[in-house]
Image: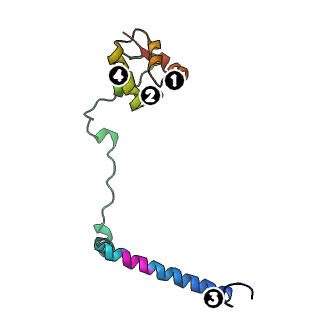
């Protein structure tokens, strides 16, 4: 007695395994189509559709043909045009490196609670701004 399996050859075992897998796949498809008749209709309409009836996905318009955006693009702060901490909105503050929506909101809340920033280094008092993050944005912020 070599093992638990009866004396089947390897080919016979593979055949039995493939038959069992086919059976379970068929039962799975049957179960899925009974629960979702709309799937069957969609598949049947795709099979019967003519190739010219299937429309390709719309392509994007070239840049010159696109209508202008109603929202003006916000410029990224640069050392030449730094962001004023006392006037910037939360959305504008998110443009700074390492500043996400949560941190931008905390900066605005700090400004509302403590008044205007007198110096950019006051930004370090806001929770979540450490020395590395402040160094990354030091040249990009100013106070007026």
Q: Is 68 one of the magenta-colored residues?
A: no
Residue 108, picture quadrant: top left
Q: CA distance from mark 2 to mark 3?
A: 63 Å
Q: What residue sits right under mark 2 in the picture? A: 99
Answer with mark 3 or mark 1, whichever residue precedes in sequence.
3
Is 28 in the magenta?
A: yes
**Label 1 – label 4 distance at C-alpha:** 19 Å
* Sequence order check, earlier mark of 4 and 2: 2
Q: Nearer the viewer, residue 1 or 119?
A: 1
Q: Is residue 106 left or right of residue 2?
A: left
Marks 3 and 1, Cα distance to the nearest angstrom?
66 Å
Tell me the residue that label 3 is attached to. Answer: 12
Which secondary structure lies at badge 1?
helix
Q: Closer to the camera, 51 or 121?
A: 121
Camera sees residue 27: yes
Q: Are marks 4 and 2 in contact (CB under 8 Å)?
A: no
How far is mark 2 from mark 1, CA to CA? 9 Å
Q: Which residues are magenta?
A: 26-31
| Res. 75 in view | no
Secondary structure mainly formed by the magenta segment: helix
Tell whether label 1 touches label 2 (CB within 8 Å).
Answer: yes
From the image, tell me which residue sits under label 1.
133
Q: Which residue is mark 4?
A: 109
Q: Secondary structure at mark 4?
A: helix
Front position among marks 4 and 2: 4
Indicate which disc, 1 or 4, sits on the residue closer to the N terminus. 4
Q: Position of residue 139 (x, y in %)?
A: 48, 16
Left-right relation of 105 to 137: left
Name which of mark 2 and mark 1 comes first in the sequence: 2
Q: In the visual, does 98 lie left or right of 13?
A: left
Pointer 1 local density, CA inside 10 Å: few below 14, some 14–19, many at least 20:
some
Q: Nearer the viewer, residue 2 or 10?
A: 2
């Amino acid at each position: 007695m070599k093992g638990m399996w009866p004396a089947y050859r390897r080919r016979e075992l593979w055949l039995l395994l493939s038959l069992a897998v086919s059976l379970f796949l068929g039962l799975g498809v049957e179960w899925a189509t009974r629960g979702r008749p709309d799937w069957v209709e969609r598949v049947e309409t795709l099979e019967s559709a003519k190739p010219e009836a299937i429309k390709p996905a719309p392509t994007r318009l070239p840049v010159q043909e696109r209508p202008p955006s109603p929202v003006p693009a916000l410029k990224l702060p640069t050392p030449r045009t730094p962001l004023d901490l006392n006037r910037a909105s939360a959305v504008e503050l998110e443009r700074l490196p390492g500043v996400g929506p949560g941190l931008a909101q905390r900066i605005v809340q700090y400004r509302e609670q403590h008044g205007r920033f007198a110096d950019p280094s006051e930004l370090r008092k806001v929770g979540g701004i450490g020395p590395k993050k402040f160094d990354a944005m030091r040249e990009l912020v100013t106070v007026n």
